[in-house]
Amino acid sequence: MNGDESVLDDPVGTSLSGRHAHLARRVGRAVGYLPDVATFCSVSAEPDDADWADLAALLGPGAFADMFSSPAVPPPGWEPAFTLEGRQLIWPGDGPPGLPGAEPDTGLVELGRDDVPEMLELVARTRPGPFWPRTRELGTYLGVRVDGALVAMAGERLRPPGWTEISAVCTAPEARGRGHAARLVGALTTRVVARGERPFLHVAEANAAALALYERLGYKTRKQVTFRGFTTP
Ligand SMILES: CC(C)(COP(=O)(O)OP(=O)(O)OC[C@H]1O[C@@H](n2cnc3c(N)ncnc32)[C@H](O)[C@@H]1OP(=O)(O)O)[C@@H](O)C(=O)NCCC(=O)NCCS
């Protein structure tokens, strides 16, 4: 099994230089996802002024530089846009999660291009974190439909070598507390482990419900992170 944890310190950069290279745009050592896929971007671990200038050239003036969990501090002239305390959790073992109840994949559907408007609607109602019209292209997204309506979903986002991030975990308010999120995260965890990779995920420190869910499934905190965004000069 893979599982070099150091690639999780720059999950955006290591995804964009590997599995997501086809969804990247670059100037020098600055790299970001294509618009509509994700706003996340990355510079080298110890960026110099030239790297920041490359990122500013990549994004344009007055643009949102979403640095994800990078601790790198840009030079003067870059205005902070947001900070959010969070955690990175990893799946500790090489087996699938032990889920009480139904078979993990029962009732779950794979979501395709035609499902995107409904996925965006569910995200707007539940706010699980950033999700854009082309985010689905980053991996497999699974959903739960009740009477035809999409009420819960989760999917794969960042792909550092040997790892897959589980993301966009959300359940419509009227469908919560029925185990949908647990089954979705469980099913994705099982799939990732089955292909010899390890799952990981991120959660805002204040999101007690989601954190409790992930810990109940068996995820362990690897480290505290601070999500940061800036406005380019
Ligand atoms: C966090 C979130 C995804 C949970 O979705 P959910 O489908 O309600 O989750 P589950 O039903 O699997 O688990 C939630 C709780 O219901 C309980 N539960 C699970 N199955 C149950 C069942 N069959 N009957 C009753 N309760 C059940 C679980 O014990 C769990 O309780 P806990 O808080 O003690 O862990 C949902 O609250 C949400 O969409 N939040 C907003 C978006 C968000 O923050 N996403 C996470 C981003 S990291």
Image (tube, helix red, strand yellow):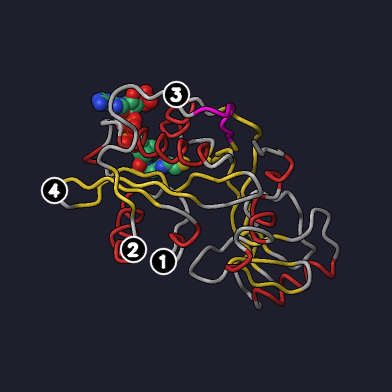
Disc 2, SS: helix
Q: Residue 230, position in %: x, y?
A: 65, 61
Stretch of the chain drawn in magenta: 89-95
User: Residue at left 69%, top 57%?
Assistant: 13
Q: Which residue is mark 4?
A: 147
Dot label at residue 216: 3
Dot placed on the residue nearer the N-terminal end, 3 or 4: 4
* Circle 2 residue: 116
Specify few, some or many for label 1: CA neighbours under 10 Å numbering under 14, 14-19, or 20 or more: some
Q: Is residue 219 left or right of residue 15?
A: left
Q: CA distance from mark 3 to mark 4?
A: 28 Å
Residue 153 horizontal/vertical position (percent): 34, 47
Mark with earlier residue (1, 4): 1
Q: Quadrant of residue 65?
A: bottom right
Report the image quarter containing ligand 1. Answer: top left
Q: Nearer the viewer, residue 91 or 233?
A: 91
Q: Residues within 10 Å of mark 3 (few under 14, many from 20)?
A: few
Q: x%, y% of residue 231? A: 64, 66
Give whichever of discs 2 and 4 has the lower sequence position.
2
User: Mark 3 is on which residue type?
Assistant: Arg
What residue is shown at x 36% (from left), y 44% (from top)? 170
Q: State which tag comes first along the sequence, 1 or 2.
A: 2
Image quadrant containing the N terminus: top right
Residue under circle 1? 133
